[in-house]
Image (spheres, rainbow, N blue to C red):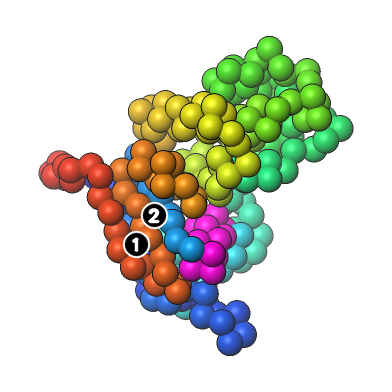
Amino acid sequence: MVDLLELKDISKVYGSLNALKHIDLNVRQGEWLAIMGPSGSGKTTMMNIIGCMDKPSSGSVFLEGIDISRESAKNLTTTRRDKIGLIFQQFHLVNYLTALENVMVAQYYHSMPDEKEALAALDRVGLSSRAKHLPSQLSGGEQQRVCIARALINYPMLILADEPTGNLDETNENIVINIFKKLHAEGSTIIVVTHDPEVAEVAERTVVLEHGKIARIENRKEEKPCEK
């Protein structure tokens, strides 16, 4: 199976703080990976580097074989916009826009807003009937699903989610996990940063960080031999 993402000897230093130390990691096309670890272990730093929101102090990040760690800030913004779907714990929805309009904002920065396509994205997460509602009129679980629809609208090659169930109750957590299961079954590559063992257990692999290093990698799916 082809590697979509490769981190080679990645380190990140903030002043005297070594947030990441010599990280090596490959993520296959279509894989579902979870990243876990205690607070301060480097999860957010790794997410920011993978999501083109930060650059490593040393090492290389390859996305589709291209070393994006050498790209300019402008090119990183373009890569993030065109290839990565970001899902945040805090949702980051525009409070005066409807659910539909929040999804269409992502289209605006990528190409041209298309209401029919945005509505279809909301339908994928079971929210077409709530399209005209403002974020304040939606539950936390519904807001997260709008965030997922927004991340999917530009057909990203990589879905990167930061604590996507962190603010949700058990019912809405299960709804979000089931959406991820469906996306994974459709071939999406998913990386989820989480504190929740139940979320991590659904992934094919879990990378556990401690003190900026990979402490261990837990595999839950038998490796299939690559086709020649």
Residue situated in front as seen by the camera: 224 or 40 = 40
> Who's the residue at 41% across and 41% down the image?
198
- The question of residue 139 being in magenta is answered with no
Q: Amino acid at mark 2?
A: Leu
Q: Are marks 1 and 2 in contact (CB under 8 Å)?
A: yes
- Relative to 7, say whether 154 is above or below: above
| Image quadrant assignment for residue 13 | bottom right
> Who's the residue at 66% across and 27% down the image?
142
Q: Position of residue 72 (x, y in %)?
A: 61, 66
Which residue has dot 2 on it? 5
How far, Cα to Cα, is label 1 from label 2?
A: 8 Å
Element at badge 2? strand
| Image quadrant assignment for residue 116 | top right
Residue situated in front as seen by the camera: 40 or 14 = 40
Mark 1 or 2, closer to the camera: 1
Left or right: where 226 falls relative to 44: left
Number of numbered markers: 2
> Who's the residue at 68% across and 45% down the image?
90
Q: Position of residue 71 (x, y in %)?
A: 55, 65
> Who's the residue at 56% across and 23% down the image?
125
Residue situated in front as seen by the camera: 198 or 29 = 198
Which residue has dot 1 on it? 25
Residue 68 disc label: none
Element at badge 1? strand
**Residue furthest to the front:** 170
Q: Position of residue 74 (x, y in %)?
A: 66, 60
Q: Amino acid at mark 1?
A: Leu
Q: Position of residue 109 (x, y in %)?
A: 71, 40
Q: Quadrant of the C terminus?
A: top left
Q: Is residue 123 visible?
A: yes
Q: Which residues are magenta?
A: 39-52
